[in-house]
């Protein structure tokens, strides 16, 4: 079975490129594979810094909605796979840089929000269409990037923000043309890789420990509401409408 990514290691820098056409949307097995790879890179003594980027049309469109539309019980596995992926990035002993382009949605937001450093192309767009897909999740990681009211606006409306706005709000370190995206990430990674691995590892542990709250616990809280949503007819209707490319018809007002 082929993996939905490609990984290379050079000069202490691991580069993991998500590569699952057409839009880097992953089923539960895909998320577990991504998590396992990031954990393995963190445990590899030859790796000092990790870059995660995406091939093709965009960085990541999140979960494979078609899998969930076909079998809503898969939400348990998808939730766990998402959790493990975001945890693998946030709790990784090595710094993780994400290089984002075009669409950054759902699980893509989770990876970005879990990372240490974000660089993106000038075509990058950030969004959380969870409500329109009958789910919850992404808020904890989005709130690690943007202010509370901006997160709620994005969540309730489903509207995107662009790279320049993300930079203005302080989430993004650099905005560059697409052809400079990976070279920029590699340059930052190289400057970190030159430092003492032991000191960098200690710094990441210290910085993670002083964050407000526990990111993983916050995300687990959100996931409980996703499971609650999946008991509602409106949630299934949202997924069915998305897959069938039609407007959703909701019965409840609750």
Image: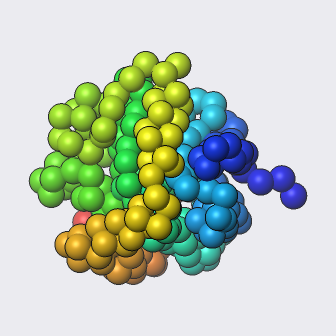
Residue 114 percent coordinates (x, y): 40, 60
173 over 87 or under it: above or below: above
- Residue 236, percent across and down? 50, 64
Residue lying at the far right of the rendered structure = 1
Q: Quadrant of residue 110?
A: bottom left
Q: Which residue is drawn at 39% across and 37% down?
A: 119
- Residue 156 visible, this orientation: no
The residue under the point 54% across, 72% down is: 84
The residue sitting at the left extreme is: 149
Quadrant of residue 222 in the image?
A: bottom left
As drawn, is 254 to the left or to the right of 181? left
Judge by depth and name the residue closer to the eye, 62 or 13: 13
Q: In the image, is residue 108 above or below residue 196?
A: above
User: Image point 63% across, 31% down: which residue?
Assistant: 56
Judging from the image, the colouring scheme is rainbow
Q: Nearer the viewer, residue 197 or 205?
A: 197
Q: In the rendered view, tell whether residue 43 sits above or below residue 113.
A: below
Residue 98 percent across, percent down from the top left? 47, 45
Quarter of the image where the N terminus is located: bottom right
- Image location of residue 144, percent across then percent down: 27, 59
What residue sits 71% from the left and 45% below the top? 8
Image quadrant in which you'd find residue 225: bottom left
**What is the number of callouts on the image?**
0
Give whichever of 244, 55 is nearer the camera.
55
Q: Is residue 84 visible?
A: yes
Q: In which quarter of the image is the C terminus?
A: bottom left
Horizontally, residue 188 falls left or right of residue 15, namely: left
């Amino acid at each position: 079975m082929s993996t939905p990514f490609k990984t290379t290691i050079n000069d202490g820098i691991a580069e993991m490129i998500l590569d699952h056409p057409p839009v880097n949307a992953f089923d539960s097995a895909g998320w577990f594979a991504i998590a396992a790879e990031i954990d393995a890179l963190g445990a590899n003594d030859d790796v000092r810094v990790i870059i995660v980027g995406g091939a093709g049309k965009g960085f990541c469109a999140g979960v494979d909605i078609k899998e969930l539309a076909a079998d809503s019980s898969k939400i348990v596995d998808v939730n766990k796979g998402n959790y493990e992926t975001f945890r693998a990035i946030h709790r990784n002993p090595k710094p993780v840089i994400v290089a984002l382009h075009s669409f950054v949605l759902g699980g893509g937001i989770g990876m970005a929000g879990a990372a240490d450093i974000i660089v993106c192309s000038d075509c990058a767009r950030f969004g959380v269409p969870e409500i329109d897909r009958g789910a919850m999740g992404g808020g904890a990681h989005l709130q690690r990037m943007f202010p509370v009211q901006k997160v709620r606006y994005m969540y309730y409306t489903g509207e995107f923000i662009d790279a320049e706005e993300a930079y203005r709000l302080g989430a993004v370190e650099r905005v560059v043309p697409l052809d400079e995206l990976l070279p920029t990430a590699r340059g930052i990674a190289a400057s970190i890789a030159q430092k003492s691995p032991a000191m960098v590892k200690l710094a990441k542990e210290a910085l993670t420990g002083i964050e407000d709250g526990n990111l993983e616990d916050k995300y687990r809280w959100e996931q409980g509401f996703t499971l609650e949503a999946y008991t509602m007819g409106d949630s299934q209707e949202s997924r069915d409408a998305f897959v069938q490319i039609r407007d959703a018809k909701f019965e409840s007002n609750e």
